[in-house]
Structures are given as C-alpha cells and as structure tokens.
Image (spheres, rainbow, N blue to C red):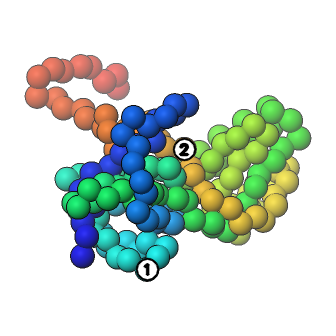
C-alpha cells in the first residue's frame, strides 16, 4: 500500500511552485480530514496509508505527497448542512456567537453561516429568528484560534518551562 508521508498546502492566490501532476483524489468529509495515521480511499478505488509525524487538519485543495513521489489532491465531500441566514448583519453576528458558544464547526461567508445538521441547534437558531435552509455542499469550516495555520503547520505550543506569567484570580 502506498504511504502519504508529507503535506503540501495550496498557496493562496498564486501558482504552486512545486506543482506536479495529480495522480489521484481523496474526497473526505470535514472530520475525516483531521488525521495522522489512517488508511483513506481515493476516488479511483486505490487505498493509501496516511502516515504523518503529527496530527493535521487538511483543507480542500491540500495535497498529500506519497512515498513514491506521486501527489494526491484533497477535496471536501458534500455533507448535509444548514445554511443559516439572518435579518441583517448584526443579527448574523449574534447567531454566529451562539453557534461558536457551542463550539460547533462552522463555515462563515458574507450573509450566511454553514453548519452540520443538528435538529436541536436548528430549533435554537429558529427560536433566535434565523432562517434555516437544508443544503448538501462541501463543508470547509474555519479553524479555531489554536488549530494552527495551513495543514497543521505553526501549531500553538504553550510551555511554562522557560517563562511564567500571572493569571488574575
């Protein structure tokens, strides 16, 4: 079985200087794109063992580099979602706060928020005046503040070995 041993993040707004022929594609749901060591299946039926040194969160457009030099594209799978819209921008911000307060993965765009379907959350949002549409689409939620940038690069580490600071009571 081929092994994926490295990640290449797609550069934003520019051509990839390391671009090479894509030999396959893995279409994964958002929770399947958080991995370290796991077998994944490509759209052509080939299985690849992802074997990375640390856990990563892959984004649609990222690439996995295989031990034979081939490159696999990562794509976001369609998932059952709610498209949440509001009366105005201020109301949308309030809805976003309620979603974030529950630590739900969300994709935020101008005028809408996409979240995974959950009937309890749907009822809450409707109670807050939101309009909810059921859709099926690729889900690329934004990452939390401590999730790092790109595909697991620049992870946030907080060590107390070399320094100290005061936390108010």
- The image position of residue 100, as x and y in percent, is 59, 45
Tell me which label, 1 or 2, sits earlier in the chain.
Answer: 1
Q: Which mark is residue 142?
A: 2
Residue 154 lies in quadrant: top left
Q: Quadrant of the N terminus?
A: bottom left
Q: Is residue 21 above or below residue 155?
A: below
Q: Residues within 10 Å of mark 1 (few under 14, many from 20)?
A: few
* Residue 70 appearing in the image: yes
> Furthest-bottom residue in view?
45
Could you give the CA–CA distance between mark 1 and mark 2, rounded to whole angstroms? 29 Å
- The image position of residue 132, as x and y in percent, is 81, 58
Q: Is residue 115 above or below residue 78?
A: above
| Residue under the point 86% across and 35% down | 88
80 with respect to 68 (left or right) = right
| Residue under the point 11% across and 28% down | 161
Residue behind mark 1: 45
| Residue under the point 11% across and 22% down | 162
* Residue 94 appearing in the image: no
167 with respect to 79 (left or right) = left
Residue 49 lies in quadrant: bottom left
């Amino acid at each position: 079985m081929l092994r994926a041993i490295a990640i290449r993040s797609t550069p934003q707004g520019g051509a990839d200087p390391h671009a090479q022929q894509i030999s396959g594609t893995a279409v994964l749901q958002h929770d399947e794109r958080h991995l370290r060591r796991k077998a994944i299946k490509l759209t052509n039926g080939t299985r690849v063992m992802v074997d990375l040194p640390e856990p990563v969160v892959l984004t649609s457009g990222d690439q996995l580099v295989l031990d034979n030099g081939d490159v696999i594209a990562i794509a976001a799978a369609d998932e059952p979602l709610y498209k949440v819209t509001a009366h105005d921008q201020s109301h949308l911000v309030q809805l976003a706060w309620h979603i974030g307060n529950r630590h739900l993965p969300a994709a935020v765009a101008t005028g809408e928020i996409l979240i995974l379907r959950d009937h309890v959350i749907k009822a809450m949002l409707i109670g807050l005046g939101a309009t909810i549409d059921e859709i099926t689409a690729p889900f690329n939620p934004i990452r939390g503040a401590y999730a790092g940038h790109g595909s697991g690069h620049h992870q946030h580490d907080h060590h107390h070995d070399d320094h100290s600071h005061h936390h108010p009571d």
